[in-house]
Image (cartoon, coloured by chain):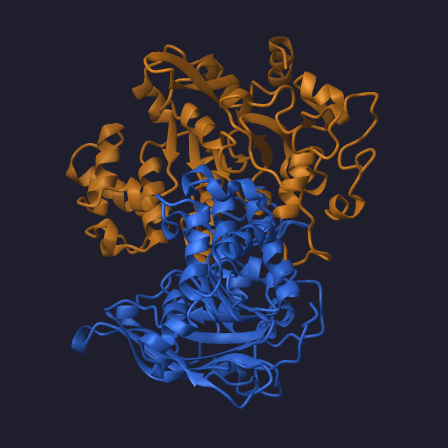
Amino acid sequence: MTAQDSVTATARSDAAAVLVARDLTKHFKVARKVRGTTLRSNFVHAAEDINLELHPGKVAAVVGESGSGKTTVARMLARLIPPTSGEIILDGEPVGRRHVYEYRHRVQLVFQDPFASLNPVHDVRYHLSRALKVHHKARGREAVDAGVADLLAKVKLEPASQFLDKLPHELSGGQRQRVAIARALAAQPSVLLADEPVSMLDVSIRIGVLNLLGELRDAEQMALLYVTHDIASARYFADTVTVMYAGRVVESGPSLEVTDNPSHPYTQLLLSAAPDPDRASPAVINAGTIPSLINPPSGCRFHPRCPYAMPICSAQTPPDFQVGADHTAACWLRQAGQGSPAGSPLPADPRPDDLGGHK
Amino acid sequence: MRPLGQARTPVLEVSRLRVDYGHGADVTHAVIDVDLVLHRGEVVGLAGESGSGKSTLAYGMTRLLPPPGRITAGRVLFYPNPDRPDLSLDLLDLDVDQLRQLRWREISIVFQSAMAALNPVLTVQAQLVDTLAAHRPEMSKPARHERAVELLRLVSISADRLRSFPHELSGGMRQRVMIAMALALEPQIVIMDEPTTALDVVTQREILQEVIELRDRLGFSVLFITHDLSLLLELADTIAVMYAGRIVESAAAPELLTAPRHPYSAGLLHSFPSLHGPRRALTGIPGSPPDLRDLPKGCAFHPRCGYAVPQCSVDVPPLAPPHGEETRLVACWLQDGRPGRPDELSRPESTASSRLSPAAVPTASDHEVAL
């Protein structure tokens, strides 16, 4: 995608978006020893030209397997790691020079593992009151206590008195993640970035935490980024879904649209691999793994695994083609003129039984 | 659903198994009076959350449980000969040498973390050949090598990977090597303890398909342990759901999916979103899993159960067929034939499709806010 394209693509709704990622790229430097002493630098191309928009009161999901770059994107947006190139735009202003500290008043991150993200020697009261003080949301003992109680109520840990003096190890996984969410809420952020917030939790309590995030999003009108490997939960929870593969966005659009009419072969693969008790016939999967990101495949990064690959796929990176309202897919098969609307069976489908079953 | 290659003769029968951790006042009952039958050629899924005792059960019944775990009661009958259903061995009575004869040869295990289960300083070949050398000393060296190649081919890994070290393989390949190793001696039973939990969905799907293909071809039985019920519904023939050390429901997979009888199973089915149809609000299960050191009285699930009656907090419900049904088991007082059984737990088994009650509340954007 050229810079020109992306500007027109994002300009459409810039007014409403609170946080925008524009062509965010991250290359991690890895040194490799070549013949004894000479060092040559290699780069892991973790994320390339990522465009994302977060709107108040909406959940945007980023879905991908491990190594797809989804966490890198979340961490760039949290400004835990600086992007190699590209821009982060908060409230219409590039944040390039804005102080990180100020940025964090507005944008907060919830980590995957609540067993690691809470300090084991501090109690719940400390975790929350410290966040309130750091972000200047409460001053004085009474205000802080009231603020902490309020935060616990927001994440449904009630009565607060039962939880205030608990240490992390005395809480269950779900309760810990709720404390981590409450801590992020202490800053009264307009954007909450959640990196796999439920994947470490037991199945029976995942939905509860997701529903809680959904309620908070509605009540506080926060913009939420939901990073996950579980496309079914993204379908359930998110308004828009962005599917990443090997550091690139392959498809994005409204979540039901993407999951019901997947337009990129990788999205179709991902959907056919997801556990699905309602599936009529067993899925058929073509083998393959995510490629090395040090030397990613040329052109479309999915082409070595793609059953529909054409010569152009290895030669040129596909831009985002419109396949529906707000629905784009980075696949040459979707080029205007190829005439395949979203979700339609792909041309020359070598495995008709396996990809047609997602209606 | 899936054709069972053979008639339903049991190959492993666990009855009234109890496993404790610790002694005296600190004792924790991790597995309580568990009954479980594994038939020949069958895939039995054991579903449960962390701390439900599912791994303890698997290690207990294979006598692999390290102290402070102790088996305090029960029997684990293994039927070694398919043609002699009257012959059985109680694994709990065997001594070390007898166990050594049995382990891997008849019952093998695929562990959760392939990286931890494989020796990092030995090649794949060395480890496969080692298994064969230990259990088949009569095999010649070239024959062992040949068998190692054959085993890798069985799990779709090319023979040139024999010389690889575990760290040179991807996570999925490592897990395949583990499966190859588990099948090396053509055991009758393979226990898989969360074999795909650390893998990506696409890799997971490939491995599961391979397991099923191999099962169909070789006819071994699988005990598949996972926390992911949605996976089991596709994979397993029979599913046993564990909660707080007990099996609370066991039924054929399609029946469990369409007509759960235990409120916990029903709750789990409401805990994973569907890939199809309109979005429906899911409720999950309120509360959190209990602490095994401090179990609630009566049915351990009653504090989280929406249907609990007074009896639930007093007596532990037995695992028995629900009233009027014979092919399944459930441990719930509501299923003893009393009137007023909730609709959710009394769906007829035949009604396929609609897994979730068609409650309204579609997208999250027009969610009621309860703050």
Q: Which chain's colour is blue?
A: B
Do we see residue B30 in this rendering?
yes
* Most foreground residue, A219 or A34: A34
**Where, by quadrant of the figure, is residue B260 drawn?**
bottom right
Q: In which quarter of the image is the N terminus of chain B?
A: bottom right
A169 over A195 or under it: above or below? below
* Most foreground residue, B158 or B235: B158
Who's the residue at 52% across and 44% down the image? B200
- Left or right: residue A15 compared with residue B275: left
**Residue B10 appears at what percent x and percent y?**
55, 81
**Residue A303 appears at what percent x and percent y?**
67, 28
Q: Colour of chain A?
A: orange
Who's the residue at 46% across and 33% down the image? A222
**Residue A306 appears at what percent x and percent y?**
69, 33
Q: Which residue lies furthest to the bottom in this view?
A: B86
A354 over A76 or under it: above or below? below
* Most foreground residue, B305 or A220: B305
B329 over A90 or under it: above or below? below
Who's the residue at 64% across and 74% down the image? B347
**Residue B250 appears at what percent x and percent y?**
53, 75
Who's the residue at 49% across and 18% down the image? A25
**Where, by quadrant of the figure, is residue A144 drawn?**
top left
B340 over A49 or under it: above or below? below
Do we see residue B316 in this rendering?
no
Looking at the image, how many numbered discs can be counted on the residues?
A: 0
